Amino acid sequence: MKKIAILGITGSIGKSALEVIREHSRDFQIVLASAHHNLEKLQKIGEEFQIKKLVFTNEIKPKIKSKDLYFGEDELLKILATIDCDIVLNAISGSAGLQYSVGTLETGIDLALANKESLVMAGEIIMEKVKNSKNRLLPVDSEHSAISQALLGSAISEVEKIILTASGGPFRTLPLKDFEEITLANTLQHPTWKMGAKITVDSATMMNKALEVIEAHWLFGKSYDEIEAVIHPQSVVHSFLECVDGSILAQMSLPTMKIPILFALTYPKHIKSDIFKTKIWKLPALTFSKVEKARYPLFFFTREIACEKGILPTILNAANEAAVSLFLDKKISFLQISKLVQNAVERESNQQNPTLEDILETNQKIYAKTLRDYYKLI
Ligand code: NDP
Ligand code: MG
Protein backbone atom coordinates (compact mmCIF):
# COMPACT_ATOMS: atom_id res chain seq x y z
CA MET A 1 0.00 0.00 0.00
CA LYS A 2 1.52 3.32 -1.10
CA LYS A 3 0.99 6.31 1.22
CA ILE A 4 0.10 9.47 -0.70
CA ALA A 5 -0.24 13.17 0.11
CA ILE A 6 -2.42 15.20 -2.25
CA LEU A 7 -1.88 18.95 -2.15
CA GLY A 8 -4.72 20.84 -3.80
CA ILE A 9 -7.09 17.91 -3.41
CA THR A 10 -10.23 20.02 -3.97
CA GLY A 11 -9.28 21.00 -7.54
CA SER A 12 -9.67 19.35 -10.92
CA ILE A 13 -6.49 17.21 -10.70
CA GLY A 14 -7.46 16.41 -7.10
CA LYS A 15 -10.84 15.15 -8.32
CA SER A 16 -9.26 12.88 -10.96
CA ALA A 17 -6.75 11.62 -8.38
CA LEU A 18 -9.59 10.73 -6.00
CA GLU A 19 -11.31 8.77 -8.77
CA VAL A 20 -8.06 6.85 -9.35
CA ILE A 21 -7.67 6.13 -5.63
CA ARG A 22 -11.32 5.12 -5.18
CA GLU A 23 -10.80 2.54 -7.93
CA HIS A 24 -7.44 1.40 -6.49
CA SER A 25 -8.17 1.58 -2.77
CA ARG A 26 -6.04 -1.54 -2.14
CA ASP A 27 -2.97 0.09 -3.69
CA PHE A 28 -3.09 3.63 -2.27
CA GLN A 29 -3.93 5.36 0.99
CA ILE A 30 -4.14 9.15 1.35
CA VAL A 31 -2.32 10.28 4.50
CA LEU A 32 -2.36 14.06 3.96
CA ALA A 33 -4.44 16.48 1.91
CA SER A 34 -4.67 20.25 1.52
CA ALA A 35 -7.00 22.92 0.18
CA HIS A 36 -6.94 26.72 0.25
CA HIS A 37 -10.51 28.09 0.03
CA ASN A 38 -12.81 25.12 0.14
CA LEU A 39 -12.72 23.86 3.73
CA GLU A 40 -16.06 22.10 3.61
CA LYS A 41 -15.04 20.07 0.55
CA LEU A 42 -11.68 19.24 2.16
CA GLN A 43 -13.41 17.89 5.25
CA LYS A 44 -15.88 15.89 3.19
CA ILE A 45 -13.03 14.28 1.23
CA GLY A 46 -11.20 13.70 4.53
CA GLU A 47 -14.19 11.80 5.92
CA GLU A 48 -14.68 9.65 2.82
CA PHE A 49 -11.00 8.68 2.51
CA GLN A 50 -10.28 8.67 6.27
CA ILE A 51 -7.38 11.09 5.89
CA LYS A 52 -5.53 11.64 9.16
CA LYS A 53 -4.07 15.05 8.31
CA LEU A 54 -6.00 17.79 6.53
CA VAL A 55 -4.40 21.20 6.04
CA PHE A 56 -6.27 24.37 5.14
CA THR A 57 -3.48 26.66 3.92
CA ASN A 58 -5.43 29.95 3.74
CA GLU A 59 -4.45 32.74 6.16
CA ILE A 60 -8.10 33.24 7.01
CA LYS A 61 -8.52 30.73 9.77
CA PRO A 62 -12.10 29.62 10.39
CA LYS A 63 -13.19 28.92 13.97
CA ILE A 64 -13.37 25.17 13.56
CA LYS A 65 -11.56 22.64 15.69
CA SER A 66 -10.93 19.04 14.76
CA LYS A 67 -8.04 16.78 15.68
CA ASP A 68 -7.31 16.02 12.01
CA LEU A 69 -7.39 19.63 10.84
CA TYR A 70 -4.35 21.95 10.63
CA PHE A 71 -4.04 25.51 9.39
CA GLY A 72 -1.52 27.55 7.40
CA GLU A 73 1.24 27.22 4.81
CA ASP A 74 3.97 26.74 7.44
CA GLU A 75 2.00 23.94 9.08
CA LEU A 76 1.76 22.13 5.73
CA LEU A 77 5.51 22.48 5.19
CA LYS A 78 6.16 21.24 8.74
CA ILE A 79 3.94 18.18 8.26
CA LEU A 80 5.58 17.43 4.89
CA ALA A 81 8.98 17.42 6.58
CA THR A 82 8.06 14.67 9.04
CA ILE A 83 5.19 12.65 7.62
CA ASP A 84 5.50 8.95 6.78
CA CYS A 85 4.59 9.12 3.11
CA ASP A 86 5.82 7.59 -0.19
CA ILE A 87 4.72 10.18 -2.71
CA VAL A 88 3.33 13.73 -2.78
CA LEU A 89 1.01 14.74 -5.62
CA ASN A 90 1.36 18.51 -5.98
CA ALA A 91 -1.92 19.56 -7.61
CA ILE A 92 -1.95 23.16 -6.36
CA SER A 93 -2.58 25.75 -9.06
CA GLY A 94 -0.09 28.50 -9.87
CA SER A 95 3.04 29.84 -8.20
CA ALA A 96 1.69 28.93 -4.73
CA GLY A 97 2.73 25.34 -5.47
CA LEU A 98 6.46 26.02 -5.67
CA GLN A 99 7.34 26.04 -1.96
CA TYR A 100 5.68 22.62 -1.48
CA SER A 101 7.55 21.08 -4.44
CA VAL A 102 10.81 22.22 -2.89
CA GLY A 103 9.66 21.13 0.59
CA THR A 104 8.78 17.66 -0.70
CA LEU A 105 12.10 17.19 -2.47
CA GLU A 106 13.96 18.22 0.69
CA THR A 107 12.32 15.42 2.69
CA GLY A 108 13.24 12.47 0.48
CA ILE A 109 9.67 11.82 -0.70
CA ASP A 110 8.92 11.27 -4.42
CA LEU A 111 7.14 14.17 -6.07
CA ALA A 112 4.35 13.62 -8.62
CA LEU A 113 4.17 17.07 -10.17
CA ALA A 114 1.05 18.54 -11.76
CA ASN A 115 2.04 22.06 -10.69
CA LYS A 116 4.07 22.98 -13.80
CA GLU A 117 4.65 26.51 -12.43
CA SER A 118 7.18 25.00 -9.98
CA LEU A 119 9.48 24.05 -12.86
CA VAL A 120 8.79 27.22 -14.83
CA MET A 121 9.92 29.37 -11.90
CA ALA A 122 12.64 27.23 -10.34
CA GLY A 123 13.51 24.46 -12.80
CA GLU A 124 17.22 24.69 -12.16
CA ILE A 125 16.87 24.58 -8.35
CA ILE A 126 14.37 21.71 -8.47
CA MET A 127 16.40 19.58 -10.88
CA GLU A 128 19.52 20.12 -8.78
CA LYS A 129 17.63 18.83 -5.72
CA VAL A 130 16.45 15.80 -7.68
CA LYS A 131 20.00 15.10 -8.91
CA ASN A 132 21.41 15.21 -5.40
CA SER A 133 18.84 12.94 -3.77
CA LYS A 134 17.09 9.60 -4.16
CA ASN A 135 13.81 11.41 -4.86
CA ARG A 136 12.07 10.89 -8.12
CA LEU A 137 10.28 13.70 -9.94
CA LEU A 138 7.34 12.17 -11.78
CA PRO A 139 5.43 14.22 -14.33
CA VAL A 140 1.62 14.34 -14.13
CA ASP A 141 0.97 16.78 -16.97
CA SER A 142 -0.41 14.54 -19.75
CA GLU A 143 2.19 15.60 -22.35
CA HIS A 144 5.12 15.00 -20.02
CA SER A 145 3.63 11.74 -18.79
CA ALA A 146 3.39 10.69 -22.45
CA ILE A 147 7.07 11.51 -22.96
CA SER A 148 8.10 9.66 -19.80
CA GLN A 149 6.13 6.61 -21.01
CA ALA A 150 7.68 6.72 -24.48
CA LEU A 151 11.12 7.09 -22.88
CA LEU A 152 10.80 3.77 -21.04
CA GLY A 153 12.10 2.09 -24.17
CA SER A 154 14.69 4.64 -25.34
CA ALA A 155 17.42 6.79 -23.82
CA ILE A 156 16.92 10.56 -24.05
CA SER A 157 20.12 10.72 -26.14
CA GLU A 158 18.25 8.75 -28.84
CA VAL A 159 15.62 11.50 -29.03
CA GLU A 160 16.05 14.27 -31.59
CA LYS A 161 12.86 16.19 -30.82
CA ILE A 162 10.12 16.33 -28.25
CA ILE A 163 6.85 17.40 -29.88
CA LEU A 164 4.15 18.48 -27.43
CA THR A 165 0.58 18.33 -28.67
CA ALA A 166 -1.83 21.20 -27.98
CA SER A 167 -5.59 21.25 -28.51
CA GLY A 168 -5.47 24.87 -29.67
CA GLY A 169 -8.19 25.76 -27.14
CA PRO A 170 -11.65 27.19 -27.87
CA PHE A 171 -10.47 29.88 -30.36
CA ARG A 172 -8.49 27.69 -32.73
CA THR A 173 -10.75 28.50 -35.68
CA LEU A 174 -12.25 31.82 -34.58
CA PRO A 175 -11.50 34.56 -37.16
CA LEU A 176 -8.83 36.87 -35.71
CA LYS A 177 -11.09 39.88 -36.27
CA ASP A 178 -13.55 38.41 -33.73
CA PHE A 179 -11.00 38.10 -30.88
CA GLU A 180 -12.18 41.49 -29.50
CA GLU A 181 -15.55 39.86 -28.75
CA ILE A 182 -14.22 36.90 -26.74
CA THR A 183 -15.94 36.54 -23.36
CA LEU A 184 -14.93 34.79 -20.15
CA ALA A 185 -17.71 32.23 -20.66
CA ASN A 186 -16.42 31.33 -24.18
CA THR A 187 -12.87 31.06 -22.84
CA LEU A 188 -13.87 28.64 -20.08
CA GLN A 189 -15.47 26.28 -22.65
CA HIS A 190 -12.46 24.11 -23.39
CA PRO A 191 -13.19 21.78 -26.32
CA THR A 192 -11.49 18.63 -24.94
CA TRP A 193 -10.34 19.02 -21.30
CA LYS A 194 -12.24 19.88 -18.11
CA MET A 195 -9.73 21.68 -15.88
CA GLY A 196 -9.37 24.45 -13.31
CA ALA A 197 -10.08 28.05 -14.43
CA LYS A 198 -6.46 29.29 -14.60
CA ILE A 199 -5.14 26.50 -16.82
CA THR A 200 -8.27 26.71 -19.01
CA VAL A 201 -7.54 30.39 -19.74
CA ASP A 202 -3.85 29.52 -20.31
CA SER A 203 -4.96 26.89 -22.83
CA ALA A 204 -6.94 29.48 -24.78
CA THR A 205 -3.92 31.84 -25.01
CA MET A 206 -1.54 28.85 -25.47
CA MET A 207 0.46 30.14 -22.51
CA ASN A 208 -0.16 26.68 -21.07
CA LYS A 209 1.79 25.07 -23.93
CA ALA A 210 4.61 27.57 -23.55
CA LEU A 211 4.81 26.75 -19.81
CA GLU A 212 4.88 23.08 -20.80
CA VAL A 213 7.80 23.68 -23.17
CA ILE A 214 9.73 25.06 -20.17
CA GLU A 215 8.54 22.12 -18.06
CA ALA A 216 9.78 19.65 -20.71
CA HIS A 217 13.12 21.45 -20.98
CA TRP A 218 13.81 20.93 -17.26
CA LEU A 219 12.32 17.46 -16.93
CA PHE A 220 14.04 15.91 -19.93
CA GLY A 221 17.15 18.10 -20.28
CA LYS A 222 16.53 19.01 -23.93
CA SER A 223 17.36 22.46 -25.35
CA TYR A 224 14.53 24.73 -26.47
CA ASP A 225 15.45 24.07 -30.13
CA GLU A 226 14.68 20.40 -29.52
CA ILE A 227 11.16 21.01 -28.14
CA GLU A 228 8.26 21.90 -30.44
CA ALA A 229 4.49 22.09 -30.22
CA VAL A 230 1.86 21.00 -32.74
CA ILE A 231 -1.86 21.71 -32.78
CA HIS A 232 -3.87 18.51 -32.39
CA PRO A 233 -7.52 19.42 -31.71
CA GLN A 234 -8.68 15.91 -30.75
CA SER A 235 -6.24 15.64 -27.76
CA VAL A 236 -5.74 11.90 -28.35
CA VAL A 237 -1.98 11.86 -28.96
CA HIS A 238 -0.51 13.30 -25.77
CA SER A 239 2.93 13.99 -27.29
CA PHE A 240 5.51 12.63 -29.69
CA LEU A 241 9.16 11.69 -29.41
CA GLU A 242 11.06 11.90 -32.66
CA CYS A 243 14.07 9.58 -32.44
CA VAL A 244 17.43 10.13 -34.13
CA ASP A 245 16.68 7.36 -36.65
CA GLY A 246 13.45 9.03 -37.80
CA SER A 247 11.11 6.78 -35.82
CA ILE A 248 8.30 8.63 -34.01
CA LEU A 249 6.88 7.38 -30.70
CA ALA A 250 3.49 8.54 -29.40
CA GLN A 251 1.33 7.85 -26.34
CA MET A 252 -2.45 7.93 -26.78
CA SER A 253 -5.81 7.75 -25.06
CA LEU A 254 -9.00 9.79 -25.15
CA PRO A 255 -8.40 12.91 -23.03
CA THR A 256 -8.28 12.01 -19.33
CA MET A 257 -5.96 12.93 -16.47
CA LYS A 258 -6.65 9.63 -14.70
CA ILE A 259 -4.09 7.71 -16.78
CA PRO A 260 -1.17 10.14 -16.25
CA ILE A 261 -2.01 10.42 -12.53
CA LEU A 262 -2.08 6.64 -12.12
CA PHE A 263 1.15 6.26 -14.08
CA ALA A 264 2.93 8.86 -11.91
CA LEU A 265 1.84 6.89 -8.84
CA THR A 266 3.04 3.55 -10.25
CA TYR A 267 6.05 4.66 -12.37
CA PRO A 268 7.79 2.94 -14.10
CA LYS A 269 5.09 0.24 -14.23
CA HIS A 270 1.71 0.22 -15.94
CA ILE A 271 -0.56 -1.60 -13.46
CA LYS A 272 -3.81 -3.36 -14.32
CA SER A 273 -6.65 -0.82 -14.20
CA ASP A 274 -10.16 -0.45 -15.57
CA ILE A 275 -10.23 3.22 -14.68
CA PHE A 276 -10.28 4.43 -18.28
CA LYS A 277 -10.23 2.59 -21.59
CA THR A 278 -10.08 3.99 -25.12
CA LYS A 279 -11.78 2.11 -27.94
CA ILE A 280 -9.51 2.68 -30.89
CA TRP A 281 -12.23 2.15 -33.51
CA LYS A 282 -14.29 4.92 -31.88
CA LEU A 283 -11.52 7.52 -32.10
CA PRO A 284 -12.10 10.60 -34.27
CA ALA A 285 -9.80 11.27 -37.24
CA LEU A 286 -6.57 12.69 -35.89
CA THR A 287 -5.25 15.94 -37.37
CA PHE A 288 -2.11 18.02 -36.79
CA SER A 289 -1.17 21.55 -37.80
CA LYS A 290 1.34 24.30 -37.04
CA VAL A 291 0.91 26.87 -34.25
CA GLU A 292 -0.02 30.26 -35.79
CA LYS A 293 1.90 33.26 -34.44
CA ALA A 294 -0.91 35.79 -34.92
CA ARG A 295 -3.37 33.62 -33.00
CA TYR A 296 -1.14 32.65 -30.08
CA PRO A 297 1.37 35.50 -29.51
CA LEU A 298 2.01 34.53 -25.87
CA PHE A 299 3.26 31.11 -26.91
CA PHE A 300 6.02 32.60 -29.08
CA PHE A 301 6.84 35.41 -26.63
CA THR A 302 7.22 32.95 -23.75
CA ARG A 303 9.48 30.63 -25.75
CA GLU A 304 11.83 33.56 -26.43
CA ILE A 305 11.84 34.58 -22.77
CA ALA A 306 12.41 30.98 -21.66
CA CYS A 307 15.65 30.82 -23.68
CA GLU A 308 17.03 33.71 -21.61
CA LYS A 309 16.55 31.68 -18.37
CA GLY A 310 17.32 33.37 -15.02
CA ILE A 311 14.50 35.22 -13.26
CA LEU A 312 12.60 36.14 -16.46
CA PRO A 313 10.40 33.01 -16.54
CA THR A 314 9.31 33.83 -12.95
CA ILE A 315 8.47 37.40 -14.00
CA LEU A 316 6.51 36.13 -16.97
CA ASN A 317 4.65 33.53 -14.91
CA ALA A 318 3.73 36.06 -12.20
CA ALA A 319 2.54 38.62 -14.77
CA ASN A 320 0.46 35.95 -16.48
CA GLU A 321 -1.04 34.81 -13.18
CA ALA A 322 -2.05 38.41 -12.39
CA ALA A 323 -3.41 39.01 -15.90
CA VAL A 324 -5.44 35.78 -15.84
CA SER A 325 -6.89 36.66 -12.43
CA LEU A 326 -7.94 40.08 -13.81
CA PHE A 327 -9.54 38.35 -16.79
CA LEU A 328 -11.34 35.86 -14.50
CA ASP A 329 -12.65 38.87 -12.53
CA LYS A 330 -13.89 40.35 -15.84
CA LYS A 331 -11.63 43.40 -15.44
CA ILE A 332 -9.70 42.98 -18.69
CA SER A 333 -10.46 41.55 -22.12
CA PHE A 334 -8.97 38.35 -23.53
CA LEU A 335 -6.63 40.31 -25.82
CA GLN A 336 -5.37 42.40 -22.90
CA ILE A 337 -3.94 39.32 -21.17
CA SER A 338 -1.13 39.04 -23.67
CA LYS A 339 -0.49 42.82 -23.74
CA LEU A 340 -0.32 43.08 -19.95
CA VAL A 341 2.09 40.13 -19.74
CA GLN A 342 4.39 41.41 -22.48
CA ASN A 343 4.50 44.93 -20.98
CA ALA A 344 5.24 43.56 -17.52
CA VAL A 345 8.15 41.44 -18.78
CA GLU A 346 9.66 43.94 -21.21
CA ARG A 347 10.35 46.61 -18.58
CA GLU A 348 12.18 44.22 -16.19
CA SER A 349 15.78 43.15 -16.46
CA ASN A 350 17.07 39.61 -16.11
CA GLN A 351 19.07 38.14 -13.22
CA GLN A 352 20.88 34.86 -13.77
CA ASN A 353 21.05 32.10 -11.11
CA PRO A 354 18.36 33.48 -8.79
CA THR A 355 18.01 31.83 -5.38
CA LEU A 356 14.68 30.40 -4.22
CA GLU A 357 14.22 33.51 -2.05
CA ASP A 358 14.82 35.78 -5.10
CA ILE A 359 12.25 33.78 -7.06
CA LEU A 360 9.56 33.88 -4.35
CA GLU A 361 10.12 37.59 -3.73
CA THR A 362 10.10 38.49 -7.44
CA ASN A 363 6.96 36.43 -7.95
CA GLN A 364 5.07 38.45 -5.33
CA LYS A 365 6.50 41.78 -6.49
CA ILE A 366 5.62 41.26 -10.18
CA TYR A 367 2.15 39.91 -9.37
CA ALA A 368 1.38 43.05 -7.33
CA LYS A 369 2.99 45.34 -9.92
CA THR A 370 0.94 43.86 -12.78
CA LEU A 371 -2.27 44.36 -10.81
CA ARG A 372 -1.19 47.95 -10.01
CA ASP A 373 -0.57 48.58 -13.74
CA TYR A 374 -4.15 47.70 -14.43
CA TYR A 375 -5.58 49.87 -11.64
CA LYS A 376 -3.45 52.81 -12.84
CA LEU A 377 -4.96 52.39 -16.29
CA ILE A 378 -8.55 52.85 -15.10
P1 NDP B 1 -7.80 23.90 -9.72
O1 NDP B 1 -7.95 25.37 -9.73
O2 NDP B 1 -8.94 23.07 -10.15
O3 NDP B 1 -7.37 23.42 -8.25
C1 NDP B 1 -6.34 24.05 -7.56
C2 NDP B 1 -6.12 23.43 -6.20
O4 NDP B 1 -5.11 24.20 -5.53
C3 NDP B 1 -7.35 23.48 -5.29
O5 NDP B 1 -7.32 22.38 -4.40
C4 NDP B 1 -7.14 24.78 -4.49
O6 NDP B 1 -7.80 24.77 -3.23
C5 NDP B 1 -5.64 24.78 -4.32
N1 NDP B 1 -5.11 26.14 -4.20
C6 NDP B 1 -5.50 27.25 -4.88
N2 NDP B 1 -4.77 28.32 -4.50
C7 NDP B 1 -3.90 27.88 -3.55
C8 NDP B 1 -2.91 28.51 -2.75
N3 NDP B 1 -2.65 29.82 -2.84
N4 NDP B 1 -2.22 27.75 -1.86
C9 NDP B 1 -2.46 26.41 -1.75
N5 NDP B 1 -3.41 25.75 -2.46
C10 NDP B 1 -4.11 26.48 -3.37
O7 NDP B 1 -6.49 23.60 -10.59
P2 NDP B 1 -6.19 22.31 -11.48
O8 NDP B 1 -6.46 21.07 -10.70
O9 NDP B 1 -6.79 22.46 -12.83
O10 NDP B 1 -4.61 22.48 -11.70
C11 NDP B 1 -3.67 22.24 -10.67
C12 NDP B 1 -2.26 22.23 -11.25
O11 NDP B 1 -2.16 21.12 -12.16
C13 NDP B 1 -1.93 23.48 -12.08
O12 NDP B 1 -0.59 23.81 -11.92
C14 NDP B 1 -2.20 23.05 -13.52
O13 NDP B 1 -1.41 23.75 -14.45
C15 NDP B 1 -1.78 21.59 -13.46
N6 NDP B 1 -2.44 20.73 -14.45
C16 NDP B 1 -3.80 20.61 -14.45
C17 NDP B 1 -4.44 19.81 -15.39
C18 NDP B 1 -5.92 19.58 -15.34
O14 NDP B 1 -6.42 18.75 -16.09
N7 NDP B 1 -6.67 20.27 -14.51
C19 NDP B 1 -3.67 19.10 -16.42
C20 NDP B 1 -2.25 19.27 -16.30
C21 NDP B 1 -1.66 20.06 -15.35
P3 NDP B 1 -9.35 25.33 -3.11
O15 NDP B 1 -10.18 24.42 -3.96
O16 NDP B 1 -9.64 25.19 -1.68
O17 NDP B 1 -9.30 26.71 -3.63
MG1 MG C 1 -0.76 19.49 -20.27
Image (tube, grey):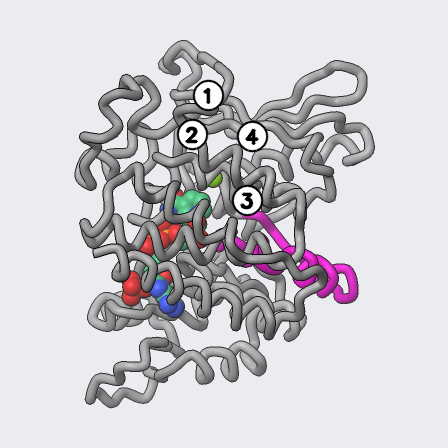
Secondary structure type for disc 2: loop
Report the amino acid beneath label 4: Leu
Q: Give coordinates of residue 29: x percent, y percent.
A: 45, 64
Q: From where the camera sits, is residue 48 visible?
A: no
Residue beneath the point at 46% across and 69% down: 365
Calculate the distance from the C-alpha at mark 1 to the C-alpha at mark 4: 15 Å
Q: Give coordinates of residue 46: x percent, y percent.
A: 31, 70
Report the amino acid beneath label 1: Glu
Front disc: 3 or 4: 4
**Side (left or right) of 290 relative to 44:** right
Q: Quadrant of residue 51?
A: bottom left
State yes or no: discs 2 and 1 in contact (Cβ < 8 Å). Answer: yes
Front disc: 1 or 4: 1
Residue 197 sits inside the magenta stretch: no
Q: Earlier in the sequence, mark 1 or mark 4?
A: 4
Front disc: 2 or 3: 2
Q: Give coordinates of residue 11: x percent, y percent.
A: 32, 56
Report the number of discs.
Answer: 4
Calculate the distance from the C-alpha at mark 4 to the C-alpha at mark 2: 15 Å
Q: Give coordinates of residue 357: x percent, y percent.
A: 59, 74
| Residue occupied by mark 3 | 263
Q: Earlier in the sequence, mark 4 or mark 2?
A: 4
**Along the line of sight, which residue is nearer the eye, 69 or 73?**
73
Q: Quadrant of the C terminus?
A: bottom left
| Residue occupied by mark 2 | 296
| Residue occupied by mark 1 | 292
Report the amino acid beneath label 3: Phe
Q: Which residues are magenta?
A: 112-139
